[in-house]
Amino acid sequence: MARLRPLELHEVDDDVRAICHEVERNSGTSASARTMAHHPPAVKALTAFRKALAKESVLDPTLIELVRLKVAERNACHY
């Protein structure tokens, strides 16, 4: 199966680079954002969507993190 590699920070535009830095501060890695950076409008739109969800969420942050971990485990994600 063909896979996209995460772009390096020097390969993305300034807006995407700023998103990657923010993601790294929050989660420790920006690999998924750098992979989506092959299509910058997608990573920018998804970032805006995630921010809106986080701002409006009624779920406890601990529960959100547990869901993220479970989804990563179920998908054999190594992040």
Image (cartoon, rainbow, N blue to C red):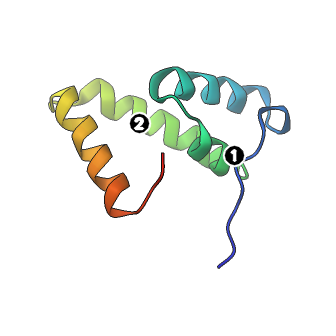
Residue kind at label 1, given as amino acid type: Ala
For image coordinates 17% across by 36% down, the residue present is 63
For image coordinates 41% across by 62% down, the residue present is 76
Measured as percent of width and height from the top left, residue 42 is found at 60, 49
Q: Mark 2 and mark 1: span between their CA atoms?
A: 16 Å
Measured as percent of width and height from the top left, residue 59 is found at 15, 33
As drawn, the residue found furthest toward the right would be: 10
Which of the labelled discs sits on residue 72, or is there none? none
How many numbered marks appear?
A: 2
Which of the labelled discs sits on residue 50, or is there none? 2
Which of the labelled discs sits on residue 37, or is there none? 1
Q: Residues within 10 Å of mark 2 (few under 14, many from 20)?
A: few
For image coordinates 15% across by 28% down, the residue present is 60
Secondary structure of residue under mark 1? loop
Residue kind at label 2, given as amino acid type: Arg
Label located before the other in sequence (2 or 1): 1
Secondary structure of residue under mark 2? helix
Asked if 4 appears above or below 18 in the picture, the reply is below
Asked if 74 appears above or below 45 in the picture, the reply is below
Viewed as shown, does residue 65 lie left or right of 22?
left
Q: Residues within 10 Å of mark 1 (few under 14, many from 20)?
A: many
